[in-house]
Image: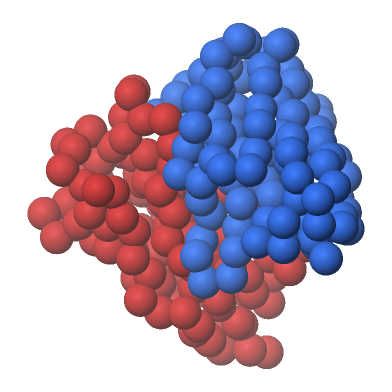
Chain colours: A red, B blue
Amino acid sequence: AQTVTQSQPEMSVQEAETVTLSCTYDTSENNYYLFWYKQPPSRQMILVIRQEAYKQQNATENRFSVNFQKAAKSFSLKISDSQLGDTAMYFCAFTIGLTGNQFYFGTGTSLTVIP
Amino acid sequence: NAGVTQTPKFQVLKTGQSMTLQCAQDMNHEYMSWYRQDPGMGLRLIHYSVGAGITDQGEVPNGYNVSRSTTEDFPLRLLSAAPSQTSVYFCASSHRQGVSPLHFGNGTRLTVT
């Protein structure tokens, strides 16, 4: 079975500080893709970052970066220089490469950036 | 560039009523899907399609029906609404199944009374 666990339901961070959101997953597949999505109060689902499991190098997108530990099946998201606009629900997800018919989502972490 | 267009944004139904949630994408994506989002449960797959004329069930298909007559459109039908179907529904599409990220519509908040 494919599962995603986000063990931090809620987190907060001071503006301009750094915060790390945790995610672990479970799959017996070797080829898969990992994602972080952001859902602000507007309800829109926005792609934050993507990581290919076959790549050892951690993905980065501006202030967002991941710490991908394949052996530990861990995929944490680091947000640097937090901004008020980062306040949102964050979902970790993965899909099985090529044959994957669905994305598997975690239950989300609600992040609040405090001014 | 519209992306994924989902209508309506809000809907209230009475138990037993039926309705169709509309979804259209203009990115020529072969893969389309419907998810429901419930508090504390993340997003769960209802149905998906890998191309026109091809649909299949996801994790929570009961009470829902889909069809895919064109590449662009993927409507979701609630056959006889139940309070357990109160949720937020997202349509999403992907360029390449199993590789590319999902592009989401803006969601539909459905309440069944």
Residue A86 coordinates in the image, percent (x, y): 62, 70
On screen, residue B29 above or below A4: above
**Image-quadrant location for residue A41:** bottom right
On the rendered image, what quadrant is the N terminus of chain B found in? top right
* Picture residue at 34% right of the left edge, 58% below the top: A4
* Picture residue at 50% right of the left edge, 83% below the top: A10
**Image-quadrant location for residue A50:** top left
Q: Taking A5 as reference, is A16 left or right?
A: right
Is residue B92 in sight in this rendering? no
On screen, residue A30 above or below A46: above
* Picture residue at 81% right of the left edge, 50% below the top: B16
Is residue B65 in sight in this rendering? yes
Residue A100 coordinates in the image, percent (x, y): 36, 30
On screen, residue B104 above or below A24: above
On screen, residue A11 above or below A52: below
Q: Taking A102 as reference, is A88 left or right?
A: right
* Picture residue at 81% right of the left edge, 57% below the top: B15
On the rendered image, what quadrant is the C terminus of chain B found in? bottom right
**Image-quadrant location for residue B54:** top right
A69 or A60: nearer the eye?
A: A69
